[in-house]
């Protein structure tokens, strides 16, 4: 089934999930509601959400840019939240994910992640994401695709 809920309802569900997870004592990165959060957006495409993250020196690799593993964790988490919000709030663990690094993600920058739902079925959700700088949305830095397990 393709995305059927409105953007506003998906945003509301994702916000509720993030607020709940932000209370967790887990020390994993990214921390919900701290390291990244939903970006304010009037209306987006059905099945799509926009997340915001500020990069900092703790995310650096030896080249002085954001480490690819940090970027992968960010897009995985954002796609997972999007899938979870569409599936009633039950966790949707990653089955497989592919990340493509087109350009370096800079440090000390406001980064946005747009997730898109391709399909949500009974057992799997398929999503893709793109990462870009807030001031340059036309310049895609990273793209990713992911498949998530749905346990209803």
Image: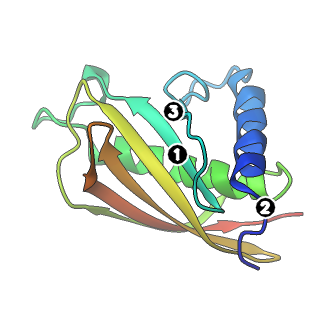
Q: Which mark is residue 30?
A: 3
Nearest the viewer among 4 and 23 is 4
Which of marks 3 and 2 precedes in the sequence? 2
Query: Residue placed at 74% from the left, 20% from the top?
Result: 23
Whether residue 21 is visible here, answered yes or no, is yes
- Quarter of the image where the N terminus is located: bottom right
Measuring from the top left, give residue 19's x and y in whole percent: 73, 27
Q: Earlier in the sequence, mark 1 or mark 2?
A: 2
Instruction: Determine the image quadrant of residue 151.
Output: bottom right
- Name which residue lies at 49% across and 26% down: 35
Side of 41 where 109 appears, left or right: left
Q: Earlier in the sequence, mark 3 or mark 1?
A: 3
Q: Is residue 128 above or below residue 109?
A: below
Q: Determine whether label 3 and label 1 are within 8 Å by CB.
A: no
Residue marked by disc 1: 50
Number of marks present in the image shown: 3
Instruction: List x then y, in percent, for residue 41.
Output: 56, 40
- Give the percent coordinates (x, y) of residue 50: 52, 45
Near mark 3 (Cα within 10 A), the count class, few <14, some 14-19 or many ≥20, is some
Provide the residue designation for mark 2: 5
């Amino acid at each position: 089934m393709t995305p059927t809920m409105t953007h506003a309802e998906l945003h509301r569900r994702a916000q509720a999930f993030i607020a709940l997870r932000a209370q967790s004592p887990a020390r994993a990165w990214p921390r919900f509601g701290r390291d990244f959060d939903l970006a304010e957006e009037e209306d987006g495409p059905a099945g799509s959400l926009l997340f915001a993250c500020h990069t900092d020196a703790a995310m650096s690799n030896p080249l002085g840019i954001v480490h690819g593993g940090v970027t992968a964790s960010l897009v995985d988490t954002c796609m997972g939240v999007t899938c979870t919000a569409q599936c009633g709030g039950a966790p949707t663990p990653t089955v497989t994910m592919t990340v493509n690094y087109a350009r370096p993600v800079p440090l000390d920058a406001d980064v946005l992640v747009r997730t898109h739902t391709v399909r949500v079925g009974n057992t799997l959700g398929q999503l893709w994401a793109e990462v870009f700088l807030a001031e340059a949305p036309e310049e895609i830095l990273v793209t990713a695709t992911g498949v998530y397990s749905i346990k209803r």
